[in-house]
Amino acid sequence: MPLEIHRKTTRAIHVGRVQVGGGAPVSVQSMTNTSTEDVAATTDQICRLQLAGCEIVRVAVPDMAAARAIRSIKSNITIPLIADIHFDYRLAIAAAESGADGLRLNPGNIGGMKKVSEVVRCAKDRGLPIRIGVNAGSLEKDILKRYGGVTAEGMVESALRHVEMLRSCDFDQIKISLKASDVSRTVSAYRLLSEKTDLPLHVGVTEAGGLYPGIVKSALGIGMLLADGIGDTIRVSLTRDPGEEVRVGYEILKALAIRRHGPEIVSCPTCGRCKINLFDVAERVEKALITVSTPIKIAIMGCVVNGPGEAREADVGIAGGDGIGILFKKGKVIRKVPHEQLVEVLLEEVDRFSRNLKVPTSSRTDGA
């Protein structure tokens, strides 16, 4: 029986054309790692993220050149762009004036209430939301002293303090993130915050690390929160190409049956009965389908004896044999195929399946 998840109802805000909260699908975000003022490189990376299914993208704005570059970047992309601001309130205003769809900032580090109110006034004039981003590594000194270091309770207090700063300016288009580099503190903080507010939450484990530790930490942290019904938008943090973050984000959503975006590939770990280089076959299929958004379940099995039966729930699959493999659908063998043609035949079936569903094989970001 599938896990039954009851999502907490949060307030709805809009980041460009993407709704966050209010029952909207959990959206997948990423952040560029290019120099934002390099318009060509940043635009190219965002376009590749769009193909991977990224729905909201964030760019660093460390200086005025980066803030001004947003105007040119926005003219070449179709997904909402959030400007990431620290320390200088003028950068937030310049980014908003350049066409950013939202701001991510820590109101406590941009220079006091007068400057916060100027940023809020600019955001209100343009209908932009603000994400309050609290990181474990940058809590206020008084909070660190009160709690004896970084704690989930201290992170929540910091976030709510900043919420009140914005609300005192009559501003409520807010979402919040509370991120630490360890899973337990991150999960505890979000659970506590979720009890205290109905604002939409952006969920992730920050500085999670390289591919393997990053995937494990993110899958556990984000997965546990989503299973609790907590989280309106997610970002997987990896020390990798940001396209990998998007891919892992969707895999987490698929594993919990929250969203189906792109193929779900099931494959066996291989054993002594396997007569085919299944590692190579699986990798080739994954790479070929990386921008496909069709919700199809694909099986890649190493044994013609048990493969179809073990993967009978798959829409389509292949299984290797001794020189000859098979193509099967829903556990039933359709025909025999020479090993060297297995991948080609499988990809043809995926394309046929997509056309029959009338779903484009290129990625889309409409909440499917």
Image (cartoon, rainbow, N blue to C red):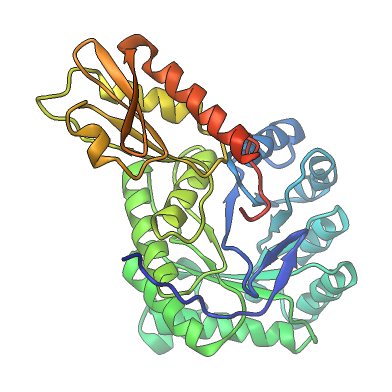
**Quadrant of the drawing holding the N terminus:** bottom left
At x 48% / y 88%, what residue is drawn? 195
Could you tell whether 351 is left or right of 330 in the image? right
Which x, y percent locates residue 335? 35, 20
At x 83% / y 63%, what residue is drawn? 93
Quick check: 261 above or below 270?
below
At x 59% / y 53%, what residue is drawn? 29
Residue 291 found in image quarter? top right
Which x, y percent locates residue 204? 47, 62
Q: Nearer the viewer, residue 307 or 130?
A: 307
At x 55% / y 28%, what residue is drawn? 351
Taking the image as drawn, is residue 144 in sight? no
Residue 212 found in image quarter? top left
Q: Nearer the viewer, residue 278 or 32?
A: 278
Quick check: 28 above or below 115?
above
Which residue is most to the left? Answer: 272
